[in-house]
Amino acid sequence: MKYILVTGGVISGIGKGIIASSVGTILKSCGLHVTAIKIDPYINIDAGTFSPYEHGEVFVLDDGGEVDLDLGNYERFLDIRLIRDNNITTGKIYQSVINKERKGDYLGKTVQVVPHITDAIQEWVMKQATISVDEDGVEPQVCVIELGGTVGDIESMPFIEAFRQFQFKVKRENFCNIHVSLIPQPNTTGEQKTKPTQNSVRELRGLGLSADLIVCRCTTPLETSVKEKISMFCHVEPTQVICVHDVSSIYRVPLLLEDQGVVRYLCKRLNLPIEMRPRKMLTKWKEMADRSDRLLEHVSIALVGKYTKLADSYTSVIKALEHSALAINHKLEVKYIDSADLETTTLQDDPVKYHEAWQKLCSAHGVLVPGGFGARGTEGKMEAISWARKQNKPFLGVCLGMQLAVCEFARSVLGWEDANSTEFNPESKHPVVIDMPEHNPGQMGGTMRLGKRRTIFSSSTSVLRKLYGDVEYVDERHRHRFEVNPELKHHFEQKGLQFVGQDVEGERMEVIELEDHCYFVGVQYHPEFTSRPIKPSPPYFGLLLASAGKLQSYLAKGCRLSPRDTYSDHSGSSSPDMDMRELKFLPL
């Protein structure tokens, strides 16, 4: 097993996740099996109770693990399926050590950070690295480990110490460190400054780790003299200084690393079993990057949500939209709308903001209401849903978005004026969305309906079923505490709102579709978590097709894109043993 540790310096949020994913991608394209681990030094057990404004969205895995959004990047880039133990937190490590101490596993010894915490970290990494993440069940050969935060943080010290010991445990030829640092370029001089990187690398070396590759994040390509200066002061060859400047698309990052000889270096440094013969590497990524730069036609989607001030709050949603837009050769424009701005109270308090929000909504080609928690802005979301329904605009509601679409329909079409979710109005006479029986209101963490669950299609004419490839069922990831009230189902279906997908028992409403509408779909699950660059999520793909006016022709052609919209058959796949096929939606 080869281990590649990715650390970061100078600032957090520098792009370690994309670098780690890109390194994994270029190694996987060489035929290696790659897994990934993300370490978060915070004391929380998992990311489940975070506000999206803290660390961005909470990503959900197949096994119901609520984890950092970087694991979403790993899954999308490497086309793998991770589990909750691929995300290590300080909370998880300390919890496991304290549980052992309570059971008497330490035989009366004093339990300390060194060696007990550091040993627990190393054992967790070594055990998790061997677990297969590919569909073929093969044990990984390379494990990419991303250490969150910044070198020098108090909370990450036990992890740095653990890896200082780890490099000797697994031997030098099986471990290397990639350090990601910032090269600022002040506007006053325009000069690229290396001092922050020098200090960061010096601090890392003081803690016992030496950077094998220094990845420099900068706005413009690194000048040769700057590379040489970093090489001289940071104890590496100039070829070990890698420049990752700002690029038009993240699909270009693996190509940047490949062009600068990262595979060649890692092959030599880690003695990797790769034949360095001339080959077409990462054709798919180059094609996607070139395509995204060439797009001329635009499609705009209004994203009506609660956390619109931080784009990271909806990372997977945006990626799912981008994957779908790229598949139909359109450039995506996301119009972020704070749902509270659409409410009549905003009209009184700030009329300019109110009219700007409505102008954005009315000018969009399609409307998306993603998931979320809390009552703020729910009336605004229902206003947007009502407008999309009446104006025959393409609409997709995800999780809470689907629940609110049901509430809006109950109020506007069924005439139940106080129809609501018991989450927002427990006293409602028409509780169309209710608490699930298994929900534990006393404890917040990990008490939702989480992870991969099966949805059975009950209608053969369902648009979404056709988009999935006319399958009988799909397995998608969930994260919710409330559900549509199954006892009221027949009231909605009589008026044209069809529940075309249910869970295996037929008790939980999973998919809604409105009759006689261009595309009005709601899903209780989160399809964005399984979207991939060349396998866009069908609900999002349907929204983009409808927004671009292509849905009917796509369905009429048997769910096939026109030749100019498909990826070439020669594109390199992200899986070592799989050839790219024409972009056609098969069962997920």
Image (cartoon, rainbow, N blue to C red):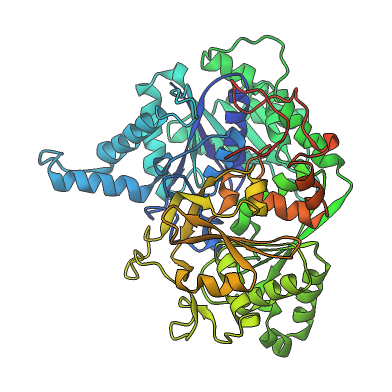
Q: Nearer the viewer, residue 122 or 359?
A: 359
Q: Nearer the viewer, residue 86 or 424?
A: 424
Q: Position of 494 compared to 192: left or right?
A: left
Query: Is there any visible trace of residue 65 in the rendered image?
Result: yes
Location of residue 226 (image quadrant): top right
Quarter occupied by the N terminus: top left
Task: Tell me which residue sits at (63%, 16%) in the image.
Answer: 264
Q: Is residue 3 above or below residue 251?
A: above
In this view, which residue lies farthest toward the bottom? 348
Q: Position of 90 compared to 316: left or right?
A: left
Query: Is there any visible trace of residue 4 in the rendered image?
Result: no
Percent coordinates x, y for residue 414 in the rendering:
61, 81
Marker count (numbered): 0
Q: Is residue 523 above or below residue 122?
A: below
Task: Tell me which residue sits at (67%, 29%) in the image.
Answer: 242
Q: Nearer the viewer, residue 242 or 474?
A: 474
Quarter occupied by the C terminus: top right
Q: Nearer the viewer, residue 422 or 283?
A: 422
Q: Is residue 559 above or below residue 236?
A: below
Q: Is residue 354 above or below residue 67?
A: below
Percent coordinates x, y for residue 362 in the rendering:
81, 71
In this view, which residue lies farthest toward the right? 296
Percent coordinates x, y for residue 550 in the rendering:
82, 50
Percent coordinates x, y for residue 236 in the rendering:
60, 24
